[in-house]
Image (cartoon, rainbow, N blue to C red):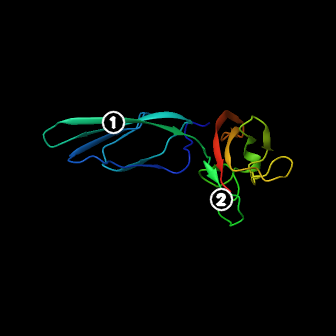
Amino acid sequence: MDANHVYGFPFQFNDASQGAHSWKWDFGDGAVSNEQNTTHRFSEIQQYYITLTVSNVDGCESDTTKPLFVSPIYVPNAFTPNGDGKNDTFYTAGYESGPFEMDAFNYEMLIFNRWGQLVFKSKSASISWDGKTVEGKNAPSGVYIYKLEITGKNDDNQPSKKTKLIGTVTLIR
């Protein structure tokens, strides 16, 4: 991706320390902030280690570091295909514009049951899983494995780095 491209919404970082007088956020990408609570946008798809160093009026310092994986997509961890109009399908969404635009990405989503059998396959981000199996029957409640492969296009309309994600989604009936 273009080094100037920034993914999605800014991340909000909030200090939960007590008695702090000064703050230094290190976002793991060369950027820093001295605000108590701040936001930051990242330009690469990767894992970052965010460090907050605080000090009190006497100069005593304390720091904490947490990992953050930045991705151009959001994958829910559960859905409820019960027809109530809320969370009825499982889909991936881009942070900036909802579902991916069909012409912007090479996209494949595979869903497997706990026995490793393929229950759903889509080559379009606009087609979501409705909780049915390949035979059209309702899939039972439980945990399913998803595998996503997405290749975006950079600002020059050329393929960018392929993103592969594997995770789980819980189907609740």
Crowding at label 1, few (<14), some or many (≥20) Cα neighbours within 10 Å? few
Mark 1 falls on what kind of element? Answer: strand
Q: Residue furthest bottom?
A: 84
Mark 2 falls on what kind of element? Answer: loop
Amino acid at pointer 1:
Thr
Residue occupied by mark 1: 64
Q: Residue drawn at (75%, 54%), measured in percent from left and top?
A: 130
- Is there any visible trace of residue 122 in the rendered image? no
Q: Residue drawn at (60%, 52%), measured in percent from left and top?
A: 96
Q: Residue 96 or 49: which is nearer the viewer? A: 49
- Is there any visible trace of residue 65 in the rendered image? yes
The label shown at residue 87 is: 2
Amino acid at pointer 2:
Asn
Q: Quadrant of residue 80?
A: bottom right
Q: Is residue 82 above or below residue 110?
A: below
Q: Position of residue 166 (x, y in %)?
A: 65, 36
Q: Quadrant of the C terminus?
A: bottom right
